[in-house]
Image: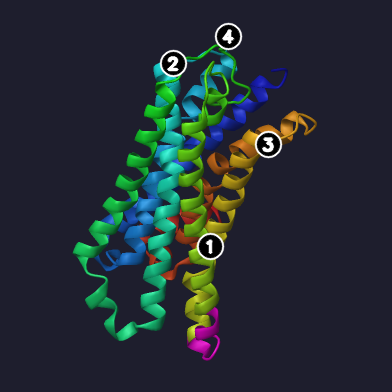
Amino acid sequence: MENRYVLLSFTALYYPLIIFCNVTVIITILLHKKLHEPMYLFICNLCVNGLFGTSAFYPKFMYDLLAQDHVISYAGCMIQIFVIYSSLMCDYSTLTVMAYDRYVALCRPLEYHSIMTKDKILKFIIFCWLNSFVCMFFLIMLLYRLTLCGITIEKLYCEIWAVAKLSCFSTTVNNVFGYIVILTYFGDAILIFCSYIYLIRKCRKSIEGRHKFIQTCVPHLLALINVTVAFMFDVLYSRYGSRNVHQSLRNFMALEFLLVPPILNPLIYGLNLTAVRQQRMFQRMKEYFP
């Protein structure tokens, strides 16, 4: 709290920057018909999801930096958990369908447009959101049924396990369902990594294939590695972490998936992908990130 005004200043600059970068990419993709391709629509979905997830943290965090008492209502806590973690799950689902899109584009190019139709893209995007919402709905319902005996959460935002630890009764059902969800999404990450190993082997045979892989798949891998590391730390530390880890490091790692992906995704995709970068609106943004 001794650094609250410094943190508030950085946050007050950083959150609008997140909004600006994501909105710029979203509008650029939506306004230009040549960008209405599967990969760009999935990138647009990532940016919308980034805005959705950060909206549950940054405004409340800035309010807490100014307040003397750091409290949140029970309903507000449940909403914050739902938004933040459904956003994280939607990120994973979107990266998974993007991996499938890249596989079809690089390994079955002649069939690409017949496979990746507009209807299928819409179904993929709906699946990304619906799947994360359904998982979080059940997790929240399991959490809501618990009777709590404590009121203190040792984290900068509400988190499922932090609330579950306050329960007076057994949380076995919550743990089992939680681990099923965690293993499912880690399974998605493993599936994506395996698909990219296959793509690397496929693309290294030609210069054009290597160029396409570097241009479209490397940003995807960076985004996936970042989200996976942050998710693993958040899940494992909240359950098995030691108090010996410095509080500042714990805070940073707990916030990592709210700090880095929302700004990393629009920058690495928007500035790296030629078709997006060449659009007139995006040229102005590029001036600030040469």
Q: Count of labels shown?
A: 4
- Mark 1 = which residue? 190
Which label's residue is closer to the chain start, 2 or 4? Answer: 4
The kind of secondary structure element at disc 1 is helix
The spot of residue 113 in percent (x, y) is 25, 76
Q: Residue at x 48, y 42 (%)?
A: 18
Q: Amino acid at mark 4?
A: Asp
Q: Are marks 2 and 3 in contact (CB under 8 Å)?
A: no
Where residue 69 is drawn, which disc sits there?
A: 4
Q: Amino acid at mark 3?
A: Tyr
Q: Residue at x 48, y 72 (%)?
A: 195
In the image: residue 240, left or right of residue 169: right
- Mark 3 = which residue? 240
Which label's residue is closer to the chain start, 3 or 4? Answer: 4
Q: Are marks 3 and 4 in contact (CB under 8 Å)?
A: no
The kind of secondary structure element at disc 2 is helix
Which label's residue is closer to the chain start, 3 or 1? Answer: 1
Q: Amino acid at mark 1?
A: Ile
Q: CA distance from mark 2 to mark 3?
A: 25 Å
